[in-house]
Image: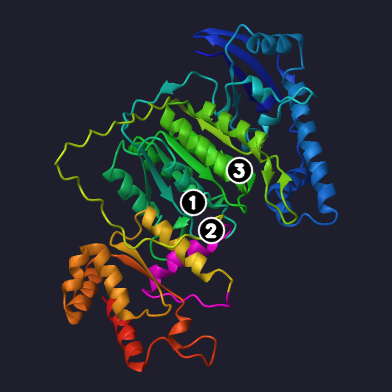
Amino acid sequence: MADLLQIVDLADAGQVQLSLHTGPGQAETAPAANFPLPLTGSELAEIRWYFTEYPENTFGEAKTRAEKVEAGLKDLGLLLFQAVFGSSDEARSLLETATGPENDQPQLTIISNRPEFLGLPWELLNNGGDAFLTSQLAGVSRRLSPGPLDDFSGRLPTDQLNILLLLPPSGEGSGSIATEALTALESLPVDAELDCLRPSSPAKLQEQLAGKPGHYHLVHFDGFTIDGQGMCMEDGSGGVTSLDAAALAQTLTGAQTPVVLVNASSSSALNDVMSFAAGLAENGVPQVVVAPLPIAGSGRVLFCENLFKGLSGGTPVAQTVATIRQAMKDHPQRPSATGPLESWDWTLPMVFESQNYSPEAIVVEEAAAPVPGMPQPEQETSGIDLPRGGPYGLIGRHAEMLDLERRFRQAPVVLLSGDVGIGKSELALGLASWLRKTGGRSGGVFYSAFEVGAGLERVLHEIGTSLAGLDFADLRNEDRRTWVVDYLKENPALLVFDSLQNLAGFPAGAPGLLDDSEMADLDSFIKEVAEG
């Protein structure tokens, strides 16, 4: 087992103490050192501005202001390093012993019950050069007490990585990474399944986990706002409720959930996020991965890819987050209002732990070779193939997509309107793809573009043949409509009708695709399905 460096917060004395644990009952301790909290409220506000507002407004004096923040971050890491490791000869010796070439890389643990201490960016520790101490560590974690940790005793599946995703009441400022997470799961060489909880309410979460104990390797709270009352969640009836860390932890631990991921919204205060994460750990959640502020651009991709690769490969969580941090540091460019800029967001991912948990690697099962002459099972259909979106996918529309999904809970028909080229089709297709991949419409997702030759008959033909095969075309016209309507009434599905402006004629004055009777047929079909 790797050595463990511990930085312990002696809050009552205003000091910190460094210790090195090389085995059970084998520990060396350096003298305690004075440690005033190094960040003022205004400095914390500047760091928040740098991560949340600067990428959206990099003009004028903002660049100079950001450079000061970046220099301040490096200086803060040096200050933390000197306060802990430069405080005495004994502290320096412990660090040299732990990081010596003859030893495996040690883990560093920050121990405190103060959110303002836990929230310090300890990942910035450096001795004034270009290198950061994290490059010499197996990982960095945060704990509430210095004693040894119990081992997680749950048994989880090893044939598939199982993730439960929860979505916030509002997508505004959420910094959602859900689409990047889904893409990362799809790219894994092992089987993985993502369940998206709809609605993402405390009661629904309790029901889902109670029905599948010991099933989920990770529960992901994506882009939620956290305040002094807890996490703001849907209440299941269109409103919002707060769930505190103790209550949430009880639900999670009751289902033997080993890892929780929380990437907080931009409006969440750092101390509130730290308190909440610490509360989860204090109440028994073994490992809590936290990003206290939104991560932008390719940082989200790097975060998700390395997180799920580590979990599925059996890598300890703190080590996985260390890999995430290094990948984000090695590829720091993020989008901004004036083009790519280098970000220090690699400092954001953190790990809290209350139990030891080493994931079991997911096993890749080799498919049996097909037997000659034996019919192969047919692939289940999920609807019509969707058109491919833009070259970069749906970017920057997480809030709109989340709002659109919620609107369907209030009304069966939603109309997107706006000028040509503003992205109506892209948004609709993004939602369609999202619902298909996350099982949001078990009856399927169906897309029809009203171009030349398109009308209700074509809609019925495309839906019917995608579900029932070419035999559907042999039905009489009235039977085809009845069959499709009955199916859609019994199975939750999504119909995407694109380019509806062409039906009546577009631009104004142009002949429409459908005459009055055909328009009436299509209208009655939509009404019949919607009322079902």
**Contact between labelled residues 1 and 2, with CB atoms less than 8 Å apart:** yes
Disc 2 crowd, CA 10 A, few/some/many (<14, 14-19, 20+) = some
In primary-sequence order, the first of circles 2 and 1 is 1
Q: Is residue 478 visible?
A: yes
At a point 37% along the width and 80% down the height, the residue shown is: 453
| Residue at the spot of label 3 | 299
User: Which span is picked out in magenta?
Assistant: 395-420
Q: Do the residues labelled 3 and 1 touch (CB within 8 Å)?
A: no
Element carrying mark 3: helix
Asked if one can make out residue 239 in the rendered structure from this viewpoint, the answer is: no
Q: Position of residue 159 (x, y in %)?
A: 31, 33
Q: What residue type is labelled 3?
A: Gly
Residue 171 magenta: no
Question: To which residue does mark 2 refer?
Answer: 394
Q: Would you name the residue on which mark 1 appears? A: 179
> Which sits in the foreground, 462 or 9?
462
